[in-house]
Image (cartoon, rainbow, N blue to C red):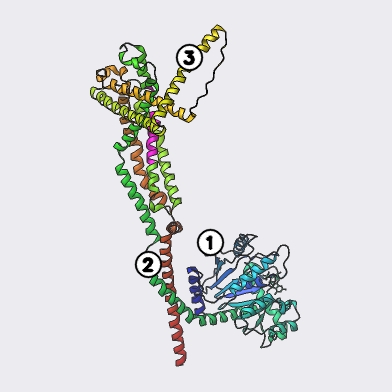
């Protein structure tokens, strides 16, 4: 007979794991009572272990959904918190501690929470039951237990004591039943007393006649009656023997008073247990057909939605993870295939050419004597030194580190682009992880690579041999570089001209040039005056130009001068003088360019081997190691559920699956019930 309860309890926990659906409800026993009414003691007597939080201040702040599972052929007794994943807990003191911690996690300000704690107890000594322990009603509010708390507890209890749940109203014998908040609440939601069981605790604290009168319940009749209990365990009993000792002492108490032997009176914890089992069984039995209907409806709806929305296509969290990672590896492969030596060379060359331009600007184009360079004697030590100095500035500028860093930056940018792909938009954590191990890999290669590069370019710091064709290429490249530079100069000059206006700019330029002349003349005068020891009044001419305009005029002058020098240098590079590398001191731009090209080739060769190849090899492996293989089942689920459409898909699929499972179990039960009925009809 008890099969039905057991199976339906199983079904109940599956249904609860789907969602807290109002329509899919199987009855449970809800335990209510005032603080100190003996509620915990009764529950512990049923379970046979001390495991509930106790203490003078209220410790039950969350409902405890307690599922008892009778395991007839096993000796071990243990509890499980399915939501916590702590596994089997054999020590009931530890269960108690966990419950205390979970309760304490509810903040003071929140007082009580309606999020239930799920606890399952497996034991050969418990009946199959589901019980919900609620926070005890408080009578008087005081400073520590404010009025809001009282109301919150009442609201929480009301939520649970609605049908089809069975109400276990715990009242202590030494308190007037008329004052029992548990009975008051039950009468509100079960006015006919059809699904309420009264439990009268502390029967030992009132005279037997008084106790018996309470149990006869003439004042507040309940259909399922009142049961009297004595749940005070005798002292000095070790945990394992609690039930037996308690029941023994309880039995001897009731046996010692004849009045409790009368037929219309129910007493004792064992009687209570049996009563609960029977009542729950009947109630479950009554719910069976309505729940079958409800589950059938829900299942049809879920199947329909699955077809309509997903065309019956199944997904798994695992396949989603695999797809996402494959996508990443695929994109990475594409990138790796397209990013080889030519691309790296382009990046490095561009950087070094810029450096060449900077060196030329600094050392040559700003040199006041630059106009004399083409006419200088080939023995002129000034220009010979200068070209050596400029080439050292290039070769000794930390090429190893800067070229390696450049390539690392380019790689990081590209990896960021890959990690920002749409498939990772829902997975910011994973994106960070990808960037993290990308930079880790690159960091481990960085030093070795930059040292290698620095070592291999070392000879160029002492001597650079140039062939004719290298020289010719260098000349061509530097001409085109300078032409680009000139173009940029012109563009900038034009944009200034356009923004200010040609006339206005011209007059501003003239003003700046005049005042510069004026300034240098004044300077001379001041110097003369110093020698002549006589002072002249300084005359400050206030300009009527606005400072911003003057700034622009100065820029325009600078650009004009720079453009002039550039034109001049381009002409020099195109001249006969620059036809041969022997004259490198006349054509520093070309010479530096040749060096830059040699540096580029050498650097890229080693960066390719030490950095790129290694990185391209290692990255996909790290994706596997750190992302794919590292994830446990929970993380895989979590990852998939970060993606809302996938989460919705998975949820519906899961719901459908669970409902199917429930439906199978229910069908089996229905068939058994029918078989039983027909066999009992035949007899
Ligand atoms: P709760 O606050 O409703 O959970 O009440 P408890 O189960 O913690 O019990 C409150 C107090 O009453 C405790 O000190 C228990 O030892 C005591 N108590 C519980 N049941 C009985 C009983 O049947 N007889 C006696 N004498 N004391 C009891």
Q: Where's ligand 1: which quadrant? A: bottom right
67 and 329: which is toward the camera? 329
Element on which disc 1 rests: loop
Report the Cα–Cα distance between label 2 and label 1.
33 Å
Q: Position of residue 351 (x, y in %)?
A: 36, 32
Q: Is residue 363 magenta?
A: no
Which one is earlier in the sequence, the residue at label 2 or at label 1? 1
**Mark 1 lies on residue:** 84
**Quarter residue 147 falls in:** bottom right
Q: Position of residue 638 (x, y in %)?
A: 45, 58
In this rendering, would 541 be left or right of 457?
right
Q: Is mark 1 within 8 Å of ligand 1?
A: no
Residue 521 numbered mark, or none = 3
Disc 2 to disc 3, C-alpha distance: 87 Å
Query: Which type of secondary structure does the marked residue at label 3 adopt?
Result: helix
* Residue 330, above or below 28: above
Residue that label 2 marks: 309
Mark 2 vs ligand 1: CB below 8 Å = no
Q: Is residue 295 visible?
A: yes
Residue 604 is marked as none
Say whether disc 2 or disc 3 marks the residue closer to the N-terminus.
2
Which of label 2 and label 1 is nearer to you? 2
Is residue 358 depicted above or below 624 in this figure? above
**Farthest residue toward the top?**
532
Q: Tell me if label 2 and label 1 are in contact, CB under 8 Å.
A: no
Is residue 393 highlighted in magenta?
A: yes
Q: Name the secondary structure under disc 2.
A: helix
- In the image, which residues are magenta? 392-411
Q: Nearer the viewer, mark 1 or mark 3?
A: 3
Residue 512: % across, % down: 45, 23
């Amino acid at each position: 007979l008890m099969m039905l309860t057991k199976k339906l309890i199983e079904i109940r926990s599956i249904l609860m794991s789907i969602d807290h659906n109002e329509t899919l409800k199987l009855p449970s026993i809800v335990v209510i009572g005032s603080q100190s009414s003996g509620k915990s003691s009764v529950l512990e007597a049923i379970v046979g272990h001390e495991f509930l939080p106790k203490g003078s201040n209220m410790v039950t702040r969350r409902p405890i959904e307690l599922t008892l599972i009778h395991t007839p052929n096993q000796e071990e007794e243990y509890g499980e918190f399915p939501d916590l994943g702590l596994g089997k807990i054999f020590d009931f003191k530890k269960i108690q501690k966990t419950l205390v911690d979970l309760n304490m996690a509810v903040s003071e300000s929140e007082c009580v929470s309606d999020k239930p704690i799920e606890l399952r107890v497996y034991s050969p000594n418990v009946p199959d039951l589901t019980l919900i322990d609620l926070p005890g009603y408080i009578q008087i509010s005081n400073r520590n237990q404010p009025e809001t708390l009282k109301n919150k507890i009442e609201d929480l209890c009301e939520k649970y004591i609605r049908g089809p749940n069975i109400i276990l109203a715990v009242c202590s014998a030494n308190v007037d039943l008329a004052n029992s908040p548990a009975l008051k609440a039950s009468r509100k939601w079960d006015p006919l007393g059809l699904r309420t069981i009264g439990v009268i605790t502390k029967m030992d604290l009132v005279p037997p006649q008084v106790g018996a009168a309470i149990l006869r319940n003439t004042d507040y009749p309940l259909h399922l009656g009142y049961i009297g209990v004595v749940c005070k365990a005798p002292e000095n009993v070790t945990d394992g023997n609690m039930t037996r000792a308690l029941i023994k002492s309880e039995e001897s108490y009731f046996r010692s008073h004849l009045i409790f032997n009368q037929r219309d009176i129910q007493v004792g914890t064992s009687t209570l247990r049996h009563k609960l089992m029977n009542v729950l069984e009947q109630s479950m039995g009554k719910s069976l057909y309505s729940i079958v209907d409800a589950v059938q409806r829900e299942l049809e709806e879920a199947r329909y939605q699955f077809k309509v929305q997903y065309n019956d296509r199944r997904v798994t969290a695992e396949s989603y993870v695999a797809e996402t990672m494959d996508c990443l590896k695929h994109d990475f492969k594409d990138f790796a295939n397209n990013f080889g030596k030519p691309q790296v060379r382009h990046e490095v060359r561009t950087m070094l050419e810029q450096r060449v331009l900077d060196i030329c600007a600094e050392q040559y184009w700003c040199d006041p004597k630059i106009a004399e360079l083409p006419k200088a004697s080939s023995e002129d030590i000034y220009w010979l030194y200068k070209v050596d100095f400029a080439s050292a500035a290039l070769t000794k500028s930390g090429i190893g580190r800067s070229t390696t860093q450049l390539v690392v930056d380019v790689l990081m940018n590209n990896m960021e682009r890959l990690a920002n792909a749409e498939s990772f938009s829902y997975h910011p954590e994973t994106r960070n992880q990808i960037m993290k191990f990308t930079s880790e890999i690159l960091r481990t290669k960085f030093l070795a690579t930059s040292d290698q590069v620095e070592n291999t370019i070392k000879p160029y710091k002492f001597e650079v041999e140039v062939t004719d064709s290298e020289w010719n290429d260098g000349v061509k490249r530097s001409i085109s570089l300078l032409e680009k530079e000139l173009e940029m100069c012109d563009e900038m000059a034009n944009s200034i001209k356009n923004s200010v206006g040609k006339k206005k700019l011209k007059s501003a330029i003239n003003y700046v040039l005049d005042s510069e002349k004026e300034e240098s003349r004044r300077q001379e005068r001041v110097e003369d005056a110093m020698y002549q020891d006589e002072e002249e009044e300084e005359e400050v001419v206030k300009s009527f130009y606005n400072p911003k305009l003057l700034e622009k005029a100065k820029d325009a002058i600078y650009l004009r001068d720079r453009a002039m020098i550039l034109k001049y240098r381009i002409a020099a590079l195109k001249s006969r003088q620059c036809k041969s590398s022997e004259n490198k001191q006349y054509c520093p731009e070309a010479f530096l360019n040749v060096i830059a090209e040699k540096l580029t080739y050498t650097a890229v060769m080693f960066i390719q081997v030490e950095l790129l190849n290694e990185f391209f090899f290692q990255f996909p492996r790290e994706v596997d190691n750190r992302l794919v293989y590292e994830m446990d089942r929970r993380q895989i689920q979590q990852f998939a559920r970060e993606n809302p459409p996938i989460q919705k898909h998975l949820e519906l699929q899961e719901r459908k699956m669970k409902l199917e499972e429930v439906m199978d179990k229910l069908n089996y039960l229905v068939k058994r019930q029918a078989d039983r009925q027909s066999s009992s009809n035949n007899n």
